[in-house]
Amino acid sequence: MKRVRVFAPASIANLGCGFDIMGLALDEVGDILEMTLTEGDGITIRNDSGVPLPDDIEQNVVTPVIRKFFEMTGNKAHVDVVIQQKIYPGSGIGSSSASSAAAAFGMNALYGEPLSEEDVVVCAMEGENLASGGYHADNAAPAVMGGIVLIRGYEPLDVIKLPVPGNFYCSVIHPKLVVSTKEARSILPKQIPLHDAIAQWGNVGGLVAGLCTGDIALVGRAMKDAVAEPYRKAFIPGFDELREKILETGALAMNIAGSGPSVFALAKESHVAKRAGVVLEEHFKALGIGYECYVVKVSNKGTRMIV
Ligand code: HSE
C-alpha cells in the first residue's frame, strides 16, 4: 500500500485579457487530497471536506484524471481518494483544477514520477474538461506548476512560466453566487470582431512584457478583456460601479477571476490591496450577498506533498 497527501493551490485564470491562456497560482488557499494505492482496479472517493460534491464518482473531476494517468502510463491499481479540503465549486478560483492538479500530481508521485510536469498538466486537464466542457489549462497549469503561466499553445501543450514581480498583490473576493463554468463559456460568442481581437492581443503582449520587466503599471494597463467580460459581467451585480470604486483605491486593475463570479483587484502595494479588499467586501455586503475575501500574493509554489 502506498499513500500520499497532496495540496494544490487555488488559481486565477485569464488575468483579464488572457482568456484560456494565462493564469496564476495563489498562496495558501487550495484543495487537499489523500490518495492511497492498493492492488486491484477501480476508484473510490470519500468527501470529508464539508463542501457539497456529487456522490457519483463519474461526476467528480478526480476520476477522469486518474483514468488518464493510467492510460498515459499503462499502470493499473485501485485508488482510494479522500478529499480533505476543498475550494467551493463554482467560485471562479480554480476549484475543479485544484482537485484535478492534486489528483494528477498525487498519481505521479505514487508511481515515482513517470510523467513530466507538462504531462501532469495534460492529465489534470481531463478534470477541467469534465467540469467545464473544454480542455483549457489556464487554471490547471498554474495550479500544478505555481507562479504565473502562459499557455502559448494547446496542440501540443506549450506552457511557459513567467516571472512573478515581487510587488504583485491581489485581493480576491468570492461572492456566494454560483456561476458554472460551462454556462459562463456557453454564453460567449464564437466569433470575435477584428477590432476586439486587436485590443486583446495588444493587451496580452503588454501583460507578458509587463511581467517580464516587472512593470506593474503596464501589467495593470494590460489587464483588460474585450472578449469574455462584456458578456460575463452580467453575472456579477454592480460590476462596472465596483470597478470604478476599486480603481479609486489606487488598485491598478479589476477583473473577473476565471469564469467568475469571483473578482480580483491587482495592486503593487500590500496596503492598497487591503484597501481594495475592503471595498470588494463592502460592495457585496451592501447587496446582501455573502462572500469570502482574501488578500494574497502570487505563489511560486504549485502542487506539492504535505504531511
Ligand atoms: N479560462 C476559463 C474560462 C477559466 O474563462 O472559462 C475557467 O475558470
Image (cartoon, rainbow, N blue to C red):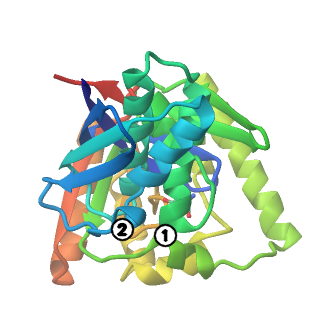
On screen, 281 above or below 158? Answer: below
The count of marks equals 2
Residue sitting nearer the eye, 31 or 166 = 31
On screen, 116 above or below 249? Answer: above
CB at mark 1 closer than 8 A to ligand 1?
Answer: yes
Which amino acid type is shown beneath numbered disc 2? Gly
- In the image, 8: left or right of 131? left
- The residue sitting at 36% across, 71% down in the picture is 242
- The residue sitting at 58% across, 29% down in the picture is 73
Quarter of the figure with the N terminus: top left
Q: Position of residue 39 (x, y in %)?
A: 33, 32
Residue sitting nearer the eye, 183 or 166 = 183
User: Could you tell which of marks 1 and 2 lies nearer the N-terminus?
Assistant: 2
Q: Quadrant of residue 22?
A: top right
Residue with the mark numbered 1: 181
Q: Position of residue 63 (x, y in %)?
A: 42, 53
Quarter of the figure with the C terminus: top left
- The residue sitting at 58% across, 80% down in the picture is 231
Q: Position of residue 173 (x, y in %)?
A: 28, 60
Seen as rendered, the residue at the extreme front is 40
Residue with the mark numbered 2: 90
- The residue sitting at 33% across, 76% down in the picture is 178
Labels 1 & 2 near each other (Cβ < 8 A): yes
On screen, 41 above or below 180? Answer: above
Can the viewer see residue 163?
Answer: yes
Q: Secondary structure at mark 1?
A: helix
Q: Position of residue 272 (x, y in %)?
A: 29, 45
Can the viewer see residue 217?
Answer: no
- In the image, 50: left or right of 35? left
Which amino acid type is shown beneath numbered disc 1? Thr
On screen, 274 above or below 177? Answer: above
Residue sitting nearer the eye, 68 or 220 = 68
